[in-house]
Image: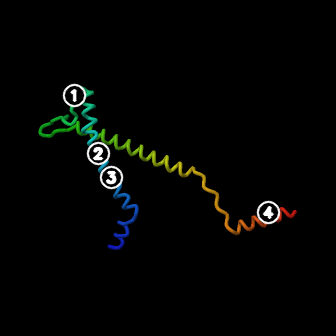
Amino acid sequence: MLQEFKKFALKGNVLDLAIGVIIGGAFGKIVTSLVNDVLMPIIGLLLGGVDFSGLQITIGDAGIKYGAFIQSIVDFIIIAFSIFLFIKAITRFKKKEEEKPAAPPVPSSEEVLLTEIRDILIDKK
């Protein structure tokens, strides 16, 4: 069982997935910082100095932080758009590779010999 797990864990796809998750987590932190520290203050200034991180409704002892929810929505939109652009670029790159015409196959030595024999027979006529 340990050998099977080792074989599974060390497959290329699993390692690629693990790397993707780690990079995705780091990218998510960068986008969150971009939204919280750059975009939302600018949007807040444009809307009259509103601080989205502090927006909340208090009902009894519970605080509903809808400002944080708005920031999460902006995070999601930025991440989703970035992934869309990345996938679109990869698809375009793969499509260009597929459109390239394949080089004509190199004839084998038998084909070359048969072609020469054919040409000689044609010349004799």
Disc 4 residue type (three-letter): Asp
Crowd band around label 2 with a 10 angstrom C-alpha radius: few (<14), some (14–19), many (20+): some
Q: Earlier in the sequence, mark 3 or mark 2?
A: 3
- Work out whether 73 lies above or below 2: above
Q: Which mark is residue 23?
A: 3
Relative side of 125 to 53, left or right: right
* Percent of width and height locating residue 1: 33, 73
Q: Position of residue 5 (x, y in %)?
A: 34, 69
- The residue closer to the viewer here, 81 or 19, is 19
Q: Nearer the viewer, residue 24 or 112?
A: 112
In the image, what residue occupies the spot 32% across and 42% down? 76
Residue flagged by tag 2: what amino acid is it?
A: Ile
Dot 3 lies on which element? helix
How packed mark 4 is, by other alpha carbons closer than 10 Å (few <14, some 14-19, many 20 or more), is: few
Nearer the viewer's eye, disc 4 or disc 1? 4
**Residue 66 placement: quadrant:** top left
* Location of mark 1 (residue): 49
Q: CA distance from mark 4 to mark 3?
A: 61 Å
Q: Does the residue at mark 3 contact the one at mark 1 (Cβ under 8 Å)?
A: no
Tag 1 or tag 3, which sits nearer the N-term? 3
Which numbered disc flags the more N-terminal residue, 2 or 1? 2
